[in-house]
């Protein structure tokens, strides 16, 4: 188990717990209520973290 | 015949033609028909998966939830992302096992892992029972879309009959090849329509996102955050988790994993799919824009929000294009569901144990397509508003397959076949009892703190499932024959 593979846990927790971490209107981002902006940001973060894992996985063909 | 109807009709005809042509001289045995001979590359797999995921429920339901409930709708944006993270590791493992053992249906996986045809039959039955309401929902959506978008020129019933006839035709002829190619047009259309509507309507009706959300907050304070009780933060977290677990457990989604050429297709998709998920954001914007523009849609009528605001704002030809996109969001998943249901009934219930190479099984699977369609038609035309309840029950049902699946992927599976069967039966019984009885954590545990009462009741069933499966497995030997 390589440590970088735990990276996607960060966006997963941020999204699942969005109601606890970000249940606010302000500050609004690009006109969006904060809760929605938080979720959009972490969906993008999901994609980014999966890309990083994918790139690192490719470098290690042994796994 | 109005302009909207002409656009919808033309799109339907093109999709149908593409679907039928997709066969192009292939010999249709069961593996070719149901899983495309396992030759689909990353792009076709992507199209199939998003084709299944963006259904009428997301098109009408997500805008309807944003319109009717506000912030709780945001869960729809989250669970897909969480599911894609899991799929990065789960889907290639499932795919490799399916290829090595020549599997064509979801129950096949359980039959092979647990060396138990009885478990396979049970999984097949649970899958079909969960799929029927999902199909009914697509058909109902189809009827609503065509009748609203054609300004009432075509009745919902007639639209449903025509749609079903077309889909049954191309599924029987082309199988999964037809679905993949129809998905291509569908995705281009839905992407264009959703982004256009999501950007245009807030700007045109409210002068931008900021003013729109400010007006909504002024009209309905608290609408854009989760409430303290009911659909609260703990409801949100538990619902995201449960639906993410169930995401790949729908029989047709599970089956489309088999269609890939390599396991790498899923890893690439896990990177791209979350971005595509953001299409939902624009669908939410439409729902929010409609809230102040076409107020007063109550209860299940909230699902009409997207179409009503479109009809009120645009020329008929554009409404027709929106309707056409909507029709395809019903047809593509509908075709996948029909195929999956036909395959699992033919292979895992009726002719349990036969080889997938047996032409009789392939013939039976195709013949079952119109039968499944007829059953769904009957439920659709019978009416009743219990569809959402049935769909939620379907979701809870497929989620019950999660323990048996996840444990089977461990190097040493702690569950025996008997244990898996017992757990699944207990979980399914709990789902049925809780759904039909209308209970939830609040009624079951009136003394518990609200954070626990608001948990999605699906968790109770899952917990009972795992406990029973584990206890029965302990009693029936720690491990059965060697599973490879």
Image (cartoon, rainbow, N blue to C red):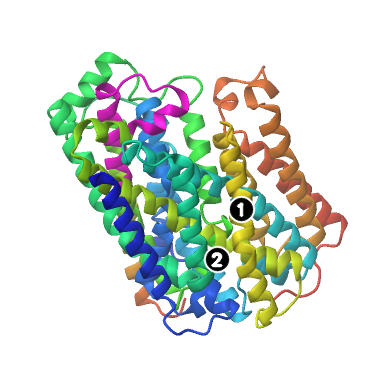
Res B16 quadrant in image: bottom left
| Image quadrant in which the C terminus of chain B is located | bottom right
Q: Does residue B399 lie above or below B99 as drawn? A: above
Q: Is mark 1 on a helix, strand or loop?
A: helix
Residue placed at 33% from the left, 44% from the top? B280
Q: Earlier in the sequence, mark 1 or mark 2?
A: 2
Residue at mark 1 shares a chain with residue at mark 2: yes
Left or right: where B317 falls relative to B389: left
Left or right: where B349 falls relative to B356: right
Chain that bears disc 1: B
Q: Is B355 part of what is drawn in magenta?
A: no
Closest to the observer, B411 or B227: B227
Q: Which mark is drawn over residue B366?
A: none
Range covered by the magenta-colored residues: B278-305
Closest to the observer, B221 or B347: B347
The residue singled out by tag 2 in the image is B255
Q: Does residue B476 lie above or below B391 as drawn? A: below
Left or right: where A7 falls relative to B114: left
Left or right: where B378 falls relative to B125: left
Residue placed at 81% from the left, 50% from the top? B471
| Dominant secondary structure, magenta | helix
Chain that bears disc 2: B
Q: Which residue lies furthest to the front in this view?
A: B1
Residue B211 visible, this orientation: yes
Q: Which mark is drawn over residue B374?
A: 1
Closest to the observer, B481 or B295: B295
Residue placed at 27% from the left, 35% from the top? B286
Res B219 quadrant in image: top left
């Amino acid at each position: 188990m390589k440590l970088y593979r735990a990276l996607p846990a960060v966006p997963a927790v941020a999204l699942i717990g969005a109601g606890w971490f970000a249940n606010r209107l302000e500050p609004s981002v690009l006109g969006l209520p904060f809760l929605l902006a938080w979720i959009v940001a972490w969906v993008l973060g999901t994609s980014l973290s999966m890309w990083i894992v994918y790139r690192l996985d490719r470098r290690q063909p042994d796994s | 015949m109005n302009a909207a109807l002409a656009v919808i009709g033309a799109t339907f005809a093109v999709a149908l033609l593409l679907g039928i042509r997709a066969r192009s001289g292939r010999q249709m045995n069961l593996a070719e028909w149901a899983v495309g001979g396992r030759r689909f590359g990353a792009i076709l797999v992507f199209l199939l998966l998003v084709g299944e995921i963006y259904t009428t429920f997301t098109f009408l339901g997500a805008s309807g939830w944003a319109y009717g409930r506000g912030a709780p709708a945001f869960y729809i944006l989250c669970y897909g992302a969480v599911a894609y993270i899991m799929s990065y590791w789960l889907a290639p493992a499932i795919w490799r096992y399916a290829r090595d053992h020549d599997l064509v249906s979801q129950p096949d996986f359980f039959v092979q892992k647990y060396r138990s045809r009885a478990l396979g039959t049970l999984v097949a039955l649970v899958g079909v029972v969960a799929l029927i309401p999902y199909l009914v929902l697509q058909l109902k959506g189809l009827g609503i879309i065509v009748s609203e978008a054609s300004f009432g020129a075509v009745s919902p019933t007639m639209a449903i009959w025509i749609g079903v006839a077309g889909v049954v035709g191309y599924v029987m002829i082309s199988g999964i090849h037809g679905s993949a190619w129809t998905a291509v047009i569908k995705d281009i259309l839905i992407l264009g329509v959703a982004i256009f509507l999501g950007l245009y309507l807030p700007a045109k009706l409210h002068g931008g996102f900021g003013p729109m959300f400010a007006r909504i907050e002024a009209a309905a304070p608290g609408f854009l955050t989760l409430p303290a009780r009911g659909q609260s933060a703990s409801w949100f977290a538990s619902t995201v988790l449960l639906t993410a677990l169930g995401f790949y457990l729908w029989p047709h989604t599970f089956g489309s994993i088999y269609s890939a050429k390599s396991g790498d297709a899923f890893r690439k998709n896990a990177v791209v799919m979350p971005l595509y998920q953001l299409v939902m954001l624009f669908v939410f914007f439409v729902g929010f824009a409609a809230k102040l523009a076409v107020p007063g849609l109550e209860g299940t009528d909230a699902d009409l929000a997207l179409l009503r605001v479109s009809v009120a704002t645009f020329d008929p030809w554009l409404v027709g294009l929106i309707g056409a996109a909507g029709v395809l969001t019903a047809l593509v998943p509908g075709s996948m569901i029909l195929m999956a249901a036909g395959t699992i009934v033919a292979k895992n219930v009726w002719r349990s144990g036969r080889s997938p190479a047996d032409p009789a099984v392939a013939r039976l699977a195709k013949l079952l397509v119109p039968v499944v369609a007829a059953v769904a038609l009957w439920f659709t035309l019978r009416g009743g508003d219990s569809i959402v309840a049935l769909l939620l029950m379907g979701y809870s049902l497929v989620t019950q397959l999660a323990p048996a699946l996840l444990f089977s992927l461990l190097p040493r599976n702690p569950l025996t076949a008997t244990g898996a069967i017992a757990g699944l039966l207990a979980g399914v019984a709990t789902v049925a009892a809780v759904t039909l009885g209308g209970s939830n954590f609040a009624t079951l545990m009136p003394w518990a703190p609200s954070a626990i009462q608001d948990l999605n009741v699906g968790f109770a069933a899952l917990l009972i499932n795992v406990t029973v499966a584990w206890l029965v497995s302990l009693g029936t030997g720690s491990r059965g024959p060697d599973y490879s």
